[in-house]
Structures are given as C-alpha cells and as structure tokens.
C-alpha cells in the first residue's frame, strides 16, 4: 500500500471516529438541555398552579387542557411530609385525537388552605419537542456528513500535493543503478525532511557507484594478475613433462600438479564470472527463446557424452516456447551449466528429461540420491559421492543468473531423478 493511501485511510478513519464521538456528545448534550428546559417549564407551571390553588381553593377540583394536563389528588399527612418530587416520561391517552401521546410528567406535593396535603401532577406534551429534535438531528447529520466529505476530500488533495514530491523522489530512487553516476532529481522542496532524504540518497548512490567502480577495477585486475601466473605455471609444467629423464613418480607428481592448476584456473574464471554477474556487468537484455537455446546446446552436448548412451526425453508444445527478457550470454551460460551437470552426473544409459512450457522450463536427470536442498545453491557445495574435479560453483552461478533474470529456480528429488525447474517470477 502506498504511503499516500495509508495516511489518507488512517486520517479518514480518525475523522470518522472524531465526528461520530462529537456527534454523540452533541446529541446527548442537546437532549439534556431540552429536557432541562422542559423540567423548568413544568416546575414554573406547577408553581403557578399551586399559587392559584392556594388563592382559589375550588381550583383544586379542576383539570388541565390537552396541551398542558394537570390534576390534584389528596394524600395522607405522612405521605405529604415525606413526599419527594420527581420527573419522568410517560404516555397519556388524548380523547380528542384518540391516541396516546408522549408527555413529560412532574409530581410534587403541597399543603392547601384546608390544612390537607395534595399531590399535583403536571404533564407537558413532548410531541412537538420530539419533532423539533428529530428535525435538528436530521440537519445535524447532514451537516456532519457534508463536513466529513469536505474534510476527507480536502485532506486527500492536501496529502496528494504534499506527497507528490515524495513520489518524484521515489521514481528517481528507482533509476539509481550502481554502474551509473547518480543523476540530479530536479525536485526542489520546501520540506526539510524531503531535502535531507534526497541528499542522503544521493550520497548513498555516489558511494555505491564508487564502490562498484572500485570492485569492477579489482575484478579486472584480478582477472589479469591471476590468470597470467597460472598460465605461466601451466606452461612450465607442460615443459617439464617433456623431459625424458623424469621418473614415473615425478611424472605422477607433475600430473597431479597439472590437474591442480587446471582446477585453479577454472575456479578463478568461475569466481570472476560470478562477481561480474552479481555486479550487474551483464545488464544488456533482450527477448530470448530458452527452448531454442536448449535445442542448440543439446546438439553438441549429446555428441560429447554419446558414450554414456543417455536417453533424451523431450516434453512440451513447440508452438509455446519459453520466452524471457534476459541477457543472451547469461541464459546460455545458465542452461549450459545445468545441462552439463545433468549429463556429467547421469547414469550410464540414464535419462535426461527436458520439459518446456510458455512459463516454465524443467531439466531432470537420473541420479543416486537427493541433494542437500539447504546448501545446494551455495558456493563450493559438493554432494556426497560427487566428482573431485568439480569446483562447486555451477549451481551457484545458475541460481545467481536465474535470480537476476526474474526466474525462480527450484529443485526436487522424485522417483530417482533430480528435477531443476525455472519459473517466471511475477513482477
């Protein structure tokens, strides 16, 4: 999720919660104020009724109108002395309208001129009050909704404007590559944090470019400085083997030394190649048909390992080749490594299975036991029972090339066969 959407979502939820809480508090405050005003009206009206009853004793026998109902009821002396005034909501039947209406009720007691206690019940219809409250709440909800919409839209516009510079900065970051100098972003900002972030990224990019150049220079120097003495040593060993006065033991020692130098040369070349791949020195990419590369490689490799009488099995639709945007040199190297492994470590008279689809490629060969799935793609991995002349970098090189080419390389051991599968990674 983008930072803009994440921030906008959280702010919108915060505003929604804030408006909801504020609306609830406002509603209960308004209701409390309206009820308080109604109770004050009832108290004032009761005071006037009691005053009139004290001045006109016969008024105690009257009753109120449908709008403001009241009634007097005689009570005992003890009940009158311990009487507690109270307010409550109730409903009363209105004969004129033939229905029940909500009312607010106030009950109090007083001593009349005849020295007797009376209970006064005063009722005030709350129908108009409830209608007014409903109208107020409706308008308030509309205003709240309008406020929320305007706030969220305004917040999004403000955030989009603020984060526009961050989006340009992120686009610029994606263009930074170790093998290229850092370009100017051209994103002047009044925000201090954005300026500091841009400066930090530029400094980091420049350090990365400098380190890349130094590493590239080291690899090129190592390639020259190591290959030359190794080649000289190989030449001198070959010269020594031409000496007719060498004993058989000396010839064996020279042969062992020659094999060691040969492995050292292959190891040096493989390590330098791996370093170049990981440093992105094979960045050129174009559309490659991996099915066609497999066919081309198999033509030569099957002849080289013809004496092993390996049975080749091809599966897949020729009309649906495995096509990938990648470096052609790396693709040929990766597939060549795996095909050589599949043929070199195969049984006499074994099977080589090649299966291709438009999104995957599988290379399988018969074998003795499963490889160590946790270590098999690490450098210098040698399976138990493997050949001693292997430098243990073939699978590591293939895995590195696959990772840098947006391919996922997996392995499984099934029915006495090693299965290596390439699958296109979803971007």
Image: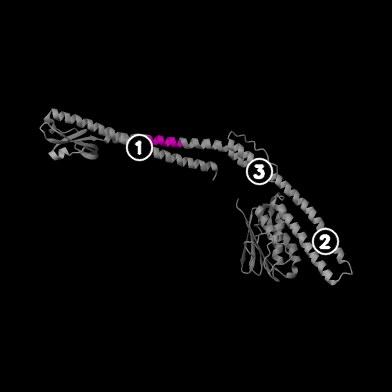
x, y (%) of residue 230? 81, 58
- Which of pointers 3 and 1 indicates the residue nearer the eye? 3
Left or right of 115, for residue 332: right
Q: CA distance from mark 2 to mark 3?
A: 44 Å
Task: Write down the quadrant of residue 200 in the picture.
Answer: top right
Q: Which residue is mark 2?
A: 234
Left or right of 60, for residue 310: right
- Which of pointers 1 and 2 indicates the residue nearer the eye? 2
Does label 3 or label 1 sit earlier along the sequence?
Answer: 1
Q: Dot 2: few (<14), some (14–19), or many (≥20) neighbours within 10 Å?
A: some
Q: Which residue is more in the foreground, 176 or 353?
A: 176
Q: CA distance from mark 3 to mark 1?
A: 56 Å
- Magenta-drawn stretch contains 141: yes
Residue 29 in sight here = yes
Q: Residue at x 59, y 38 (%)?
A: 194
Q: Which residue is more in the foreground, 379 or 157?
A: 379
Helix, strand or loop: magenta stretch: helix
Classify mark 2: helix, strand or loop: helix
Does label 1 or label 2 sit earlier along the sequence?
Answer: 1
Q: Which residue is mark 1?
A: 27
Q: Which residue is mark 3?
A: 204
Region rendered in magenta? 140-149
Task: Write down the quadrant of residue 50 in the picture.
Answer: top left
Is there a contact, CB below 8 Å, between mark 2 and mark 3?
Answer: no
Classify mark 3: helix, strand or loop: helix
Is there a contact, CB below 8 Å, between mark 3 and mark 1?
Answer: no
x, y (%) of residue 385? 68, 69
């Amino acid at each position: 999720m983008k930072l803009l959407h994440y921030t906008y979502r959280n702010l919108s939820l915060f505003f929604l919660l804030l408006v909801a809480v504020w609306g609830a508090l406002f509603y209960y405050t308004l209701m409390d104020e309206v009820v308080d005003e109604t109770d004050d009206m009832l108290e004032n009206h009761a005071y006037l009724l009691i005053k009139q009853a004290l001045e006109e004793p016969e008024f105690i026998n009257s009753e109120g109108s449908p709008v403001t109902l009241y009634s007097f009821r005689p009570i005992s002396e003890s009940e009158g002395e311990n009487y507690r005034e109270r307010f409550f909501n109730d409903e009363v039947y209105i004969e004129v309208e033939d229905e029940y209406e909500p009312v607010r009720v106030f009950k109090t007691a007083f001593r009349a001129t005849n020295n007797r206690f009376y209970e006064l019940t005063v009722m005030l219809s709350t129908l108009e009050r409830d209608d007014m409250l409903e109208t107020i709440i409706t308008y308030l909800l509309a205003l709240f909704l309008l406020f929320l919409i305007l706030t969220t839209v305004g917040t999004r516009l403000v955030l989009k404007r603020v984060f526009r510079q961050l989006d340009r900065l992120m686009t610029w970051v994606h263009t930074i590559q170790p093998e290229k100098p850092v370009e100017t972003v051209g994103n002047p900002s009044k925000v201090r944090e954005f300026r500091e972030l841009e400066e930090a990224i530029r400094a980091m990019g420049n350090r990365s470019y400098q380190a890349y150049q130094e590493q590239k220079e080291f690899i090129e120097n190592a390639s020259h400085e190591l290959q030359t003495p190794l080649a000289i040593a190989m030449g001198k060993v070959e010269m020594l083997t031409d000496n007719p006065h060498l004993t058989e033991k000396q010839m064996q020692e020279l042969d062992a030394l020659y094999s060691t130098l040969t492995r050292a040369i292959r190891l040096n070349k493989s390590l330098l190649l791996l370093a170049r791949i990981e440093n992105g020195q094979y960045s050129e990419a174009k559309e490659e048909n991996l099915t066609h590369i497999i066919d081309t490689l198999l033509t030569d490799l099957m002849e080289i390992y013809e004496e092993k009488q390996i049975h080749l099995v091809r599966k897949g639709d020729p009309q649906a080749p495995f096509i990938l945007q990648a470096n052609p040199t790396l693709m040929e190297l990766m597939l060549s490594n795996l095909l050589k492994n599949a043929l070199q470590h195969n049984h006499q008279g074994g099977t080589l299975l090649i299966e291709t689809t438009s999104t995957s490629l599988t290379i399988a060969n018969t074998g003795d036991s499963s490889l160590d799935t946790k270590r098999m793609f690490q450098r210098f991995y040698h399976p138990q029972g493997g050949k001693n002349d292997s430098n243990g970098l073939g699978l590591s090189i293939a895995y590195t090339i696959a990772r840098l080419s947006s391919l996922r390389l997996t392995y499984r051991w099934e029915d006495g066969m090693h299965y290596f599968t390439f699958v296109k990674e979803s971007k």
